[in-house]
Amino acid sequence: MSMKAPAVPAPVTPTHRQLLPRQELFAYHASRGASLAQASRLAGYSPQGARQRGSVLMANSDIRLRVEEFRRSWMAERDASIAEAVEETGQVVEMAIRLERPTAALMAIELKLKLRGFIHDRRFSLYTESPDDDLSTCLFDPREDEDPPLEPLPEAPASPAEPPATPPEPVSEPASTAAADTSTAPAAVPAPAATAPVLRIPPVPARVLETFDIDPKAFPTVCPGDPQEPLSP
């Protein structure tokens, strides 16, 4: 009796997204069942604040989509491997029954159920607890985002340069129109002549002037701004 392997879906080709190398590694490990703290540590982030770091990374929609792409591709490969192992295990069961080896047949059946996921086997666990899990609840250091990448990221293609805009050419008016505009234009108004600055002298009491034998009528009350001009009484 031969067992027919179930149909295996074609692996999904992941779409390339512009993510940092550590973000790619985080998405890779998170897609394979690692916790947020484990995926952060395996991606290269420090253990301090690994759980919070993973929560912040998973808040990015591009990273979540990348995790889903990795998960679909990995699940397709995993289902294909399990289907192949189950088919070979079925052949082992048939051989054990034909050779009248019931113990070997039972062990092969148990392994087949484990591969199908009906029996949990701790040996199949991909990720184990880490001794620095106590640091995963701390706050992470935001300066880790400033670390330069090991390899330069590919630059985005430059957009085609737009041709420089040509200024509009001035429209030339006919000579008759220009002459008419000149004849009808109002005459220029001459600017008013600037007045010379003067300095007003405050009144001086007559008794003070008499003390210095100065005639009050001859004492000037206005001082011109230009020292060359005569004083005016």
Image: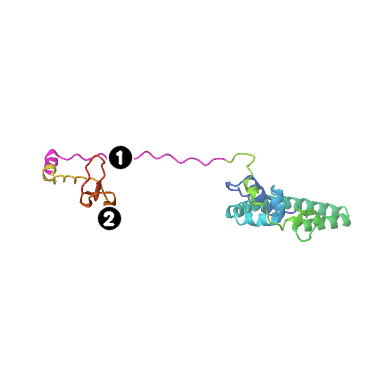
Between 147 and 20, the residue placed more toward the observer is 147
- Residue 171 belongs to magenta span: yes
Q: Percent x, y for residue 168?
A: 28, 40
The Cα atoms of the two marked residues, 1 and 2, are separated by 78 Å
Q: Percent x, y for residue 112?
A: 78, 56
- Residue 111 belongs to magenta span: no
Circle 2 residue = 207
Q: Percent x, y for residue 118?
A: 76, 61
Q: Earlier in the sequence, mark 1 or mark 2?
A: 1
> Looking at the picture, which amino acid does disc 1 mark?
Pro
Q: Residues within 10 Å of mark 2 (few under 14, many from 20)?
A: few
Q: Which residues are magenta?
A: 154-180
Instruction: Residue at 88% x, 56% y: name it.
Output: 103
Mark 2: secondary structure? helix
Q: Residues within 10 Å of mark 1 (few under 14, many from 20)?
A: few
Say if residue 84 shows up in the picture: yes
Mark 1: secondary structure? loop
Q: Percent x, y for residue 189?
A: 16, 46
Instruction: Residue at 76% x, 57% y: name it.
Output: 134
- In the picture, residue 167 is in which quadrant? top left
